[in-house]
Amino acid sequence: MSQKERWVLVSILSAVFLLAATDIAGDSKEGVDFWHLVLEGSVGLISLFGIFYVLRDSFKTKQNLIEANQKFSAYREESEKWRTESKKYLDGLSCAIDEQLSKWGLTSAEKEVAFLLLKGLSLKDAANVRNTTEKTARVQSMAIYAKAGLSSRSELSAFFLEDLLVPQKI
């Protein structure tokens, strides 16, 4: 339910409560039967319950949103901290990968495709990033594997990332 819908519902329930309270006040002066006053009082109490229920839900939603924003901010700060702390290592890894790609004799276009594949992009996405066709990206990826003596993207990734895994303690 949107915020606008909540406020419309609260307004309607408030009007019902006020009308019921006004009617009860008028009826009690006229000496109306007790059961009639109880019935109208029940309508007023039910509408009052509805108002509190909707407002409580609205406040819960707002509190959840605040908490989610705080967590997101904390994650963002943690992410930025990690990027800052690991920048020199990532730059070094990037340079080391570039050197290896040069040793394999890759062209600049093939290097670009190799980096995009290592980042996890599909051939279609790599082609879109480079403004080429998917067929061109596929041909370039095949050239990369052939020049490197590898057979697939997973072997390309493993070539560079295998040593990054933390050794398991046995």
Image (spheres, rainbow, N blue to C red):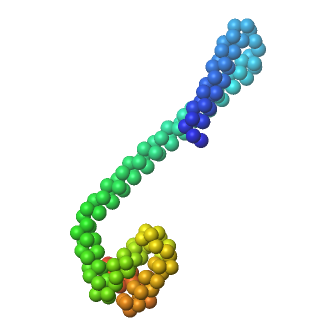
In the figure, is residue 100 to the left or right of 18? left
Picture coordinates of residue 54 (x, y %)?
A: 58, 35
Q: Give percent across and percent down for residue 158.
A: 38, 83
Front in this rendered view, residue 5 or 107: 107
From this view, report whether residue 22 is shown above or below residue 62.
above
Residue 19 shows up from this direction: yes
**Left or right of residue 151: residue 52:** right
Residue plotted at (25% across, 71% down): 91
Splitting the image into 4 quarters, where does residue 19 fall?
A: top right
Which residue appears at 45% of the width and 86% of the height?
Answer: 142
Q: Is residue 50 above or below residue 166?
A: above
Q: Nearer the viewer, residue 150 or 81?
A: 150
Name the residue at 73% across, 7% down: 30
Q: Quadrant of residue 79?
A: bottom left
The x, y position of residue 64, in whole percent, is: 47, 45
Q: Residue at x 34, y 82 (%)?
A: 107
**Residue 155, picture quadrant:** bottom left
Instruction: Tell me the quadrant of the picture where the C terminus can be found.
Output: bottom left
Q: How many marks?
A: 0
Image location (x, y in percent) of residue 110: 38, 80
The answer to whether residue 161 shows anywhere in this view is: no
Q: Is residue 130 above or below residue 111?
A: above
- Which image quarter is the N terminus in? top right
